[in-house]
Amino acid sequence: MFYRILFIMGISFLLIGQIILSKGNAFVYSLEPIDFAHWSLLVGVVLLIPQVISFPKKPFSYIGIPLTIIGITCIIGMCVIDFIFWSFTNDQLRDDFTNHITQVPSIWKTFMTIGPSSKVFNLGLLTLSLNYWKTEKLGVGILILATLILWHVIPTPHRLIFGYSFTLIAFGIILFGKDIKTMLKHRV
């Protein structure tokens, strides 16, 4: 139960980070005393780890766990690089850093292209959710919708906010559906 709660808190932190990032770079660079947006993302993905590695040992987990952990690693790397961007006091320093780091594909492509794209991370989460297809079709269906939004297949404004909102709802249903149903039966 504790890992499931941490997981939901982690997705909530991801959503908070995306809401802050939606305000734009100027807003994020002006945050004090820390870069709250990327700290929210970092804390969010770290909180996911205990549940991710605890998903049932089923065929979908053997694919979903590594994909999600790779996605988490890419997001952590992206956050570290964005902390460096945030630490610079002006755009010239940021431009110089960008010009330098884009010349290093092993860093730029891994952590700035793949990491924030959500493709690997969200494919991992979607794959893990398929373990619950028989019991929580609604949650898995909502997660499929969220993944399509996050991957730009379904265009929507503020796609990251909508995508992670739906991801939060989906995993709430997937991880707590039985508990909610049991509680409702006892109340009736």
Image (cartoon, rainbow, N blue to C red):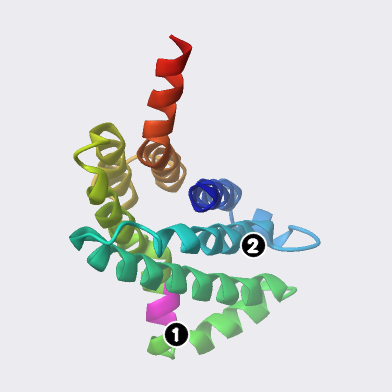
Q: CA distance from mark 1 to mark 2?
A: 20 Å
Magenta range: 108-112
Indicate whether residue 45 is drawn in magenta. Answer: no
- In the rendered structure, find residue 107 and report the number of the disc placed on it: 1
Q: Element type at marker 2? A: helix
Q: Which amino acid is tagged 1? A: Ile
Please tell me whether residue 44 is drawn above or below residue 15 in the rendered image: below
Q: Position of residue 60 (x, y in %)?
A: 21, 59
Quadrant in the picture for residue 169: top left
Residue occupying image coordinates x 43% and y 48%? 160
Please tell me whether residue 171 is drawn above or below residue 126 in the rendered image: above
Is residue 26 in sight in this rendering? no
Q: Position of residue 94 (x, y in %)?
A: 62, 77
**What residue does disc 2 label?**
39
Using residue 135 as the reference point, say whether residue 111 is left or right of it: right
Please tell me whether residue 63 is drawn above or below residue 17 in the rendered image: below
Secondary structure, magenta segment, majority class: helix
- Tell me if mark 2 has few (under 14), some (14-19) or many (20+) residues whose alpha carbon lies within 10 angstroms of its own: some
Q: Nearer the viewer, residue 50 or 156?
A: 50
Using residue 131 as the reference point, say whether residue 17 is left or right of it: right
